[in-house]
Image (spheres, grey):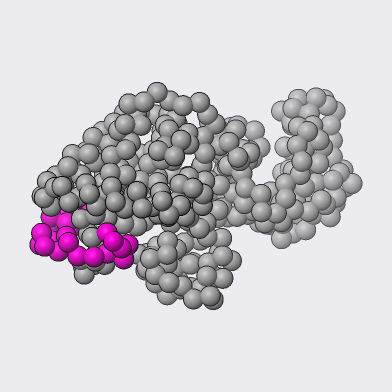
Amino acid sequence: MVYDSLSDYELGFPGPLRDKLVAAVLDGSKTSSTGLVIGYEHDSEPLPEPGQRSTLIDSDGQPLAILEVTEVRQVPLGEIDLAHAIDEGEGYSSVADWRAGHESFWHSDEMRGYLGQPDFTVDDGTVTVAERFRVASLIPDATTVGVAIAAESAALATALRAAPPADLDRPTCCPPWTVRGEFAHAAIALSRTLAMLDAPPPPGPPVDTARYYSPDERFSPPADRERVDSAQDFADQRTPAALIGWFEEQAAQVVARVSGTPGSRLVTTRHGDPMRLTDFQVTRVVELAVHGLDLADALGVAPWLTPRAAGIVEGLLFGLSAPRAARELGVDRAGLLRRATGRVAVSDAERARLRELGITWLTLG
């Protein structure tokens, strides 16, 4: 199990078939799957339920996405319908083709060995678990996250260096922060990675990225006040040039340290949660991207949101549905993220549509 509160979602057995099925999920062509009740009974596991989330893993056990079950039916094998077969994303054009492919898997030596039944066969009456799901969140790889942090950090520093020093004292949409104060908060948040890597790895299993943003005491008014005051004090003790220079040094160190450390390495967050390093770095991309939008607005300049950072935040919030969400709301990527993170108020209708599209709401300080 990769994460402490989510079971692993395993398609087939490790190998070429799983790799093919996982790729189909990630490109959006696979939105259904079929298991056997006997398989759940063999594993002493309950059947999935709508709303249940799990971690899609590849053949190496690496997490790639968080899936959410949207429908579960117990269906005799002989009653599987064409729509379900097509939505399995394996290119089937008929139920007969779908069944032949699945019988080949269920009658394989690997499946029979797994069940401990060397003569196991299915027939029309075999009860299947016909499941539909959606990709709730994407889990990027360490390289992608590292590139995003480097690019977004550089864009942020460049934008602030280009601003007149007096403009860094402008108010932001997060009062009482000034531009300097909110920038200092994002800079400090990124720099925490270094101390976390200096500390020994905590025991697992880790929490997933969305759970890091749980609406609990970590985002209570006293905790938020401490974050606001400490960042503003840090900024007020430095000139704009010194603050930007410190951020650039910290960002360079973080990128270098992280690139030489396995993404699966566990770190302890300031809240006490164990997290995979790559997942924690995703939260740093969120900090840089979202606060960067605030700072651009306060400075009155176009947002510098970089494509890699935007893609990572969109994947966390929307899974595969971000392009559709932006299209339906009539906004660009920056506009979508402003609405999804509370920077811009949304109407009741927009909020309802975002829920229908499966947004993962985050609690942000």
Using residue 141 as the reference point, say whether residue 253 is left or right of it.
left
The N terminus lies in which quarter of the figure? top right
In the rendered image, which quarter is residue 352 located in? bottom right
Residue 214 spot, x, y in % from top left: 51, 49
In the rendered image, which quarter is residue 80 located in? bottom right
Which residue occupies the extreme front position in the image? 222
Report the number of numbered marks.
0
Using residue 93 as the reference point, say whether residue 58 is left or right of it.
left
Q: Main secondary structure of the magenta part?
A: helix
Using residue 90 as the reference point, say whether residue 200 is left or right of it.
left
- Residue 174 in magenta stretch: yes
Tell me: residue 129, above or below residue 114. Answer: below
Q: Is residue 270 visible?
A: yes
Q: Is residue 307 visible?
A: no
Image point (40%, 45%), residue name: 282
Residue 146 spot, x, y in % from top left: 32, 41
Query: Start and end of the magenta stretch?
Result: 153-177
Which residue occupies the extreme right position in the image? 125
Image point (20%, 44%), residue name: 247
Tell me: residue 155, above or below residue 352. Answer: above
Image point (36%, 53%), residue name: 225
Residue 11 spot, x, y in % from top left: 64, 40
